[in-house]
């Protein structure tokens, strides 16, 4: 009996990210943070892969994070519409993947940080983005 409501048939392999063509866009006016752009590839064991071009991310104190993820709709304000739509699409992809993983993991997604893939996926993405930056 599955007491944790895990959907074992829906559990998928971890997602992996790769970044290429990272390029500096600009500095932020208030502080040392930098805006970068890269092409990202997200794969689950090379079976389900998606490529996202020209995705913006912020490099701050040695950590990279996706620009605009803090907006509820994932649409960063102040960007040209074509760039904002690309960001929104990638952010929605990340949110959908996280929701699918959490749905498959059932209650273990809430009670066991070791089983929750969201922090692990975030860390893999940060590592991929940071590794794409020139030294």
Image: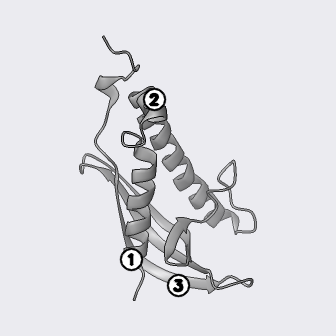
- Residue 95, compared with residue 128, is above or below; it is above
Q: Is residue 99 left or right of residue 116?
A: right
- Whether residue 77 is visible here, answered yes or no, is yes
Q: Nearer the viewer, residue 79 or 94?
A: 94
Residue at point 44%, 65% (across, down): 126
Residue at point 57%, 60% (across, down): 86
Q: Which mark is residue 24?
A: 3
Question: What's the CA distance linking mark 1 and mark 2?
Answer: 31 Å
Q: How is the image coloured?
A: one colour
Q: Is residue 84 left or right of residue 93?
A: right
Question: What's the CA distance linking mark 3 and mark 1?
Answer: 11 Å
The quadrant of the rendering that contains the N terminus is top left
Please tell me which of labels 1 and 2 falls first in the chain: 2
Q: Give the residue number, with chain letter if any, for mark 1.
A: 132
**Label 3 Cα crowd, 10 Å radius (few <14 / some 14-19 / many 20+):** some
Residue 10 figure quarter: top left
């Amino acid at each position: 009996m599955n007491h944790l409501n895990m959907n074992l048939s829906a559990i998928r392999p971890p997602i992996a990210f790769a970044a290429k063509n990272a390029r500096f866009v600009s500095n932020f006016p208030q502080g040392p943070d930098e805006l970068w752009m890269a092409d990202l590839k997200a794969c689950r064991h090379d079976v389900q892969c998606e490529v996202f071009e020209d995705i913006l991310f912020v490099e701050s104190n040695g950590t990279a994070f996706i620009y605009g993820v803090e907006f509820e709709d994932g649409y960063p304000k102040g960007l040209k519409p074509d760039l904002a739509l690309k960001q929104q699409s990638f952010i929605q992809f990340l949110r959908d993947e996280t929701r699918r993983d959490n749905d498959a993991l059932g209650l273990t997604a809430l009670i066991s940080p070791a089983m929750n893939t969201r922090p692990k996926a975030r860390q893999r993405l940060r590592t991929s983005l940071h590794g794409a930056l020139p030294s």
